[in-house]
Image (cartoon, rainbow, N blue to C red):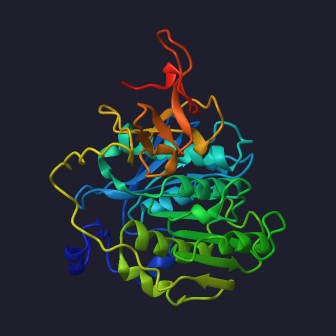
Amino acid sequence: MATGSASAADNPYQRGPDPTRTSVATENGPFANTSVSVPTGYGFNGGRIYYPTDTSQGTFGAIAISPGYTALFSAELAWMGPWLASHGFVVIGIETNSRNDFDTARGTQLLAALDYLTQQSPVRDRVDPTRLAVAGHSMGGGGALSAATRRSSLKAAVGIAPYSPSSNLANDRVPTMIFAGQADTVVTPSYATGLYNSLPSTTESIYLEVAGADHGFMVGRSNPVMIRTMLPFLKMFIDNDARYSQFLCPLLDSSGVVTSRSTCPLLPSTPTTPPTDPPTDPPTNPPGSASEIVGTQSGRCVDVPNASRTNGTRVQLYTCNKQTNQAWTYTSGKQLQVYGTMCLDAAGSGNGAAVQIYSCHSQTNRLIS
């Protein structure tokens, strides 16, 4: 059984013994772990959950991982499950709905996997739903970055040679780590550097170029640079564990690293004791101010998928994330407005009529009494 140091009293999320240069570089951490398969039907194509068997230290932070384009998690990145679980994380590795899914679709599936993990999975009681992260390789790495731009409550995102043709990382507020391979001709170091450079200066981040690495440097096997740097990054931002900053700020072991950049000191948010009382309902927003519309039973928000501004886009319930595509204003004209110009609109008048967004006008299918 893994035990923590005395300083754990100051950080309720700290898990495991004090780390050493040797311990962060090992694939087998202090936590015994096991796994369970995930069926299809939850917004992604099934997969596998890996988790520590220890129940004495409370809940654990979690990370969802996506494979690359045309790849399978089970063949490409399955080694990451036991590795991270042995260091005190719950991991869900997903198979994608289509092997040809692009980054945005993979990001959606990563978020669906986290929702399943925390709400419906057989290990949901072992997971802290407030401490979640995403990662992936290649197109899956792009999926992780896409997920980060859409769910700012995530604690960390890791793109491993990420290909991100669809995301605007200027909107990424999630602490982000990007790996590149020196010999990668698919996602070149210059491409990965461009992604890193597009992150806001206020977003905590780190970039590492692995010496001699090609596009598949972590496929089917661990990589020592990735092992000893990704683990501290996740510990710092998922667990708020400052004990791990010594390995990244500055980079303690630069062997096998061509280039590294970061926003050191990489400061995670200040840990606080998890609340024991349920939160009270927020005050009602005054007329004319934007607010979320939250389902009483689901706890999710009315959301415009992918922040679309296209007439006829049907709305959905989605995890609340404080983004503009969930900010609705009840106007003096009795309309629910999003983006300032689009209104919630009934696509028909009968039972089962779809609800969509459409350019605002004064027709009765826009009016909310």
Q: Residue 218 or 120: which is nearer the viewer? A: 120
Total count of labels: 0
Horizontally, is 268 left or right of 101 in the view?
Answer: left
Q: Position of residue 240 (x, y in %)?
A: 36, 72
Quadrant of the rendering where the C terminus is positioned: top left
Q: Residue 313 or 96: which is nearer the viewer? A: 313
Horizontally, is 46 left or right of 16 in the view?
Answer: right
Image height check: is 348 above or below 172? above
Q: Position of residue 182 (x, y in %)?
A: 77, 77
Q: Quadrant of residue 359?
A: top right
Image height check: is 314 above or below 253? above
Quadrant of the rendering where the N terminus is positioned: bottom left
Q: Position of residue 226 (x, y in %)?
A: 59, 73
Q: Residue 6 or 344: which is nearer the viewer? A: 344
Q: Pick out the residue farthest to the top.
A: 350
Q: Quadrant of residue 271?
A: bottom left
Q: Residue 339 or 132: which is nearer the viewer? A: 339
